[in-house]
Image: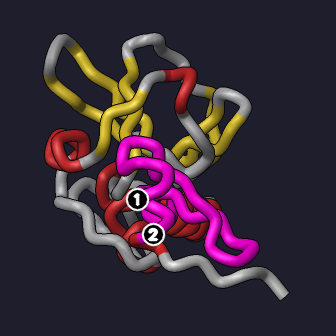
Amino acid sequence: MPAQVHVPSLIARVGTASVLTFAVGTTMLTPGLVNEAEAAGHSTRALDIAASKKGAPYRWGATGPHRFDCSGLTLYSFKKAGKKLPRTAQQQYNKTRHISRSQRKRGDLVFFHAGRSVYHVGIYAGNGKMWHSPKTGAVVRLERIWSNNVWYGRVR
């Protein structure tokens, strides 16, 4: 049975600057880690939901459940996963935590831009691919990211 430690005594002994990560019993506690893990869970669920809509037709302004435009698919997927997003791709970009290409993970949002304006969004699926609802006449599909003019965002 692990020894019980009185946290204020522990902090006094190691100093407050050192106590960003500490053990309680056999569990490590790191501030912010729970939020990242929770965000990853929502993002993975949203990715699965988007993939389940494979073949759904594109319709401008549609937010599901049977037709989608690009931001309608991301809005729908994250809503079903328990997270709220604004309506448009630009608003969604403004709401996410911006991350680099090297930090991207499955379930992060992929934003296509021209200059500073975001015009398209999808959900990163890994291996340079994303789920998205591309344009009139097309359907929700998995597709390789075709441009370097993309930014990435993580839904919090």
Height in image: 74 above or below 138? below
Residues under numbered marks 1 and 2 in contact, where contact means CB atoms less than 8 Å apart: yes
| Residue 104 location, quadrant | top right
Residue 79 image point, x, y percent: 36, 75
16 falls in the magenta region: yes
The C terminus, quarter of image? bottom left
On the image, numbered disc 1 is attached to which residue? 12
Residue found at x 20% / y 49%? 95
Mark 2 residue crowding within 10 angstroms, few (<14) / some (14–19) / many (20+): few
Helix, strand or loop at disc 1?
helix
| Residue 64 location, quadrant | bottom left
Mark 1 residue crowding within 10 angstroms, few (<14) / some (14–19) / many (20+): few
Magenta stretch, residue numbers? 9-35
Q: Nearer the viewer, residue 75 or 36?
A: 36
Residue found at x 15% / y 24%? 117
Height in image: 60 above or below 7? above
Residue 20 image point, x, y percent: 46, 50
Residue 27 image point, x, y percent: 68, 71
Render colour scheme: secondary structure
On the image, numbered disc 2 is attached to which residue? 9
Side of 57 where 95 appears, left or right = left
Side of 87 where 67 appears, left or right = right
Of all residues, the one furthest to the right in this rendering is 1
Which amino acid lies under the numbered mark 2 shown in the image of this protein? Ser
Which amino acid lies under the numbered mark 1 shown in the image of this protein? Ala
Residue found at x 40% / y 46%? 154
131 falls in the magenta region: no
Q: How many marks?
A: 2
Q: Nearer the viewer, residue 61 or 77?
A: 77
Helix, strand or loop at disc 2?
helix
Height in image: 151 above or below 148? below
